[in-house]
Image (spheres, helix red, strand yellow):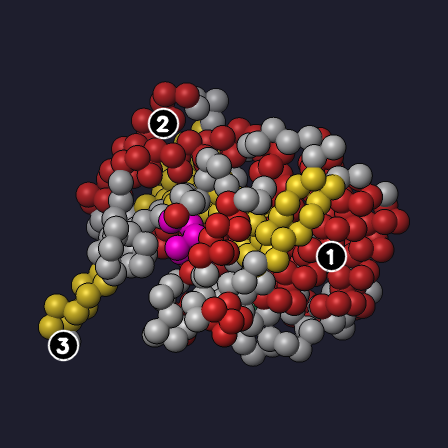
């Protein structure tokens, strides 16, 4: 029987707490289905810097390539020491080197049954206004004179094509409204977003006529996300718009503590919660680990659907997701962390979730 090697990259701030929680939940859920998982801990972030002098040591970069999937905690990126060779963004380096071109960010109503938000933001992950990754060498923001900064935006046809394909595939597999909303600002960013829309239409015409396609401006989309979020299914967009819209969608379903995400490419995938390092609560055992837990379940889903791995992988993900849903619907304050007006610590929440998984098995 195959043993899946999953890399744990705990990161900074609340990272060690939420990644440990996710690993614990994966461990219990996989034992309940008979799936074999081995965790491989690799250094990243400030802990790596203290030990090796850099935030993304070469051993970590090599180590992850020998694993089936990766679970990354948040990184405090911009504030790393300037002598760090990996400055300014280790997670950006990982995404670029392993070509994790799609950032998939679902927003789902787990907290109540009154609204039925169930959408996914599919965000291009390798270019746009992303200064540290959109050039081969150097940085995409620069001072023209001492009072003027220019930021370079990169949009490539090939990137638009593959992210569009990803979005249509997801819309098809979700089997819901089968609606892709391509979000843009082509009335202002005429060339870049014009190219993006052109390629999205192309991909649609070539193989995804069973999925509906609509095009919407980013400003009206952000309003409609608030007034009528249930109308959306898959939101396909460029990097910066996707970053903002996915946080907005997370706010609608309970906040950053409930917002999972997966960075994926053709060969590799990395679970990474949407939230940051949350320094205000780091080390206090109060962080909500659900984002990282659901991100890890997304990683299992990716291994099953993209890599054709065994059915137990899919079943393990379902057990995790069902237990999370059940626990978040509970009226007992001990079943939720304090960001959701509950009273559970990170560890207490994790233990209850594991007991629920075992009870449901
Ligand atoms: P960074 O600089 O790393 O982005 P940040 O604090 O500016 O960190 P986030 O980490 O995304 O940004 O957090 C924003 C707010 O949301 C903070 O007040 C934080 O406490 C809260 N928050 C984020 N993630 C969680 C979580 N998992 N559980 C509880 N609260 C969270």
- The residue at the point 52 percent across, 34 percent down is 170
Q: Secondary structure at mark 2?
A: helix
Q: Residues within 10 Å of mark 3 (few under 14, many from 20)?
A: few
Disc 2 CB within 8 Å of nearest ligand 1 atom = no
Residue 345 versus residue 357 in the image, above or below: below
N-terminal of the two: label 2 or label 3? 3
Give the residue at x 42% y 50%: 95
Q: Secondary structure at mark 1?
A: helix
Give the CA distance from mark 1 to mark 3: 50 Å
**Front residue of this view, candidates 299 and 175:** 299
Question: Which image quadrant for residue 5?
Answer: top right
The one nearer the camera, 300 or 171, is: 300
Residue holding disc 1:
24
Quarter of the figure with residue 69: top right
Residue 176's x, y, as percent?
Answer: 58, 33
Residue 160 visible, this angle = yes
In the image, taking residue 136 as reference, residue 260 lies left or right, namely right
Total marks shown come to: 3
Residue shown at 76%/64% (left/top)?
349
Q: Residues within 10 Å of mark 1 (few under 14, many from 20)?
A: some
Cβ atoms at labels 2 and 3 below 8 Å apart: no
Q: Earlier in the sequence, mark 1 or mark 3?
A: 1
Foreground tag (2 vs 3): 3
Q: Determine which of the numbered discs, if any, sits on residue 146 in the image.
A: 3
Q: Which residue is mark 2?
A: 203
Where residue 259 appears, as percent x and y from the top left, is 57, 56
Residue range of the region highlighted in magenta in the rendering: 91-96
Q: Main secondary structure of the magenta part?
A: helix
User: How far apart are the two marked residues, 2 and 3, measured between alpha carbons?
Assistant: 43 Å
Q: Give the side of residue 76 with respect to residue 317, left or right.
A: left
């Amino acid at each position: 029987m195959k043993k899946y090697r999953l890399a744990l990259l705990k990161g900074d701030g609340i990272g060690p707490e939420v990644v440990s929680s996710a690993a614990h939940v994966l461990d219990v859920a996989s034992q309940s289905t008979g799936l074999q998982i081995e965790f491989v801990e690799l250094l990243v972030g400030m802990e790596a810097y203290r030990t090796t002098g850099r935030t993304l040591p070469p051993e970590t970069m090599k180590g992850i390539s020998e694993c089936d999937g990766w679970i990354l905690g948040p990184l405090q990126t911009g504030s790393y020491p300037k002598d760090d060779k990996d400055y300014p963004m280790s997670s950006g380096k990982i995404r670029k080197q392993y070509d994790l071109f799609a950032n998939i960010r679902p927003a789902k109503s787990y907290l109540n049954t009154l609204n039925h938000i169930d959408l996914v933001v599919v965000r291009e992950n390798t270019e746009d206004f992303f200064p540290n990754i959109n050039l081969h060498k150097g940085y995409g923001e620069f001072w023209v004179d001492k009072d003027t900064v220019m930021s370079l935006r990169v949009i490539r046809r090939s990137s638009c094509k593959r992210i569009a394909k990803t979005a249509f595939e997801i819309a098809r597999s979700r089997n819901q409204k089968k609606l892709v909303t391509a979000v843009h600002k082509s009335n202002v960013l005429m060339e870049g977003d014009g190219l993006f829309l052109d390629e999205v239409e192309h991909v649609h015409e070539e193989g995804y006529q069973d999925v509906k396609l609509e095009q919407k401006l980013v400003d009206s989309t952000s309003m409609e996300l608030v007034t009528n979020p249930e109308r959306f299914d898959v939101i396909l967009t460029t990097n910066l718009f996707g970053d903002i819209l996915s946080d907005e969608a997370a706010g609608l379903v309970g906040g950053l503590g409930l917002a999972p995400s997966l960075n994926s490419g053709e060969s590799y995938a990395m679970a990474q919660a949407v939230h940051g390092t949350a320094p205000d609560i780091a080390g206090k055992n109060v962080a909500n680990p659900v984002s990282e837990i659901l991100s890890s379940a997304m990683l299992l889903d990716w291994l099953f659907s993209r890599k054709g791995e065994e059915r137990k992988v899919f079943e393990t993900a379902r057990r995790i997701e069902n237990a999370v849903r059940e626990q978040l619907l509970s009226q007992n304050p001990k079943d939720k962390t304090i960001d959701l007006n509950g009273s559970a610590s990170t560890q207490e929440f994790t233990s209850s979730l594991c007991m629920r998984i075992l009870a449901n098995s």
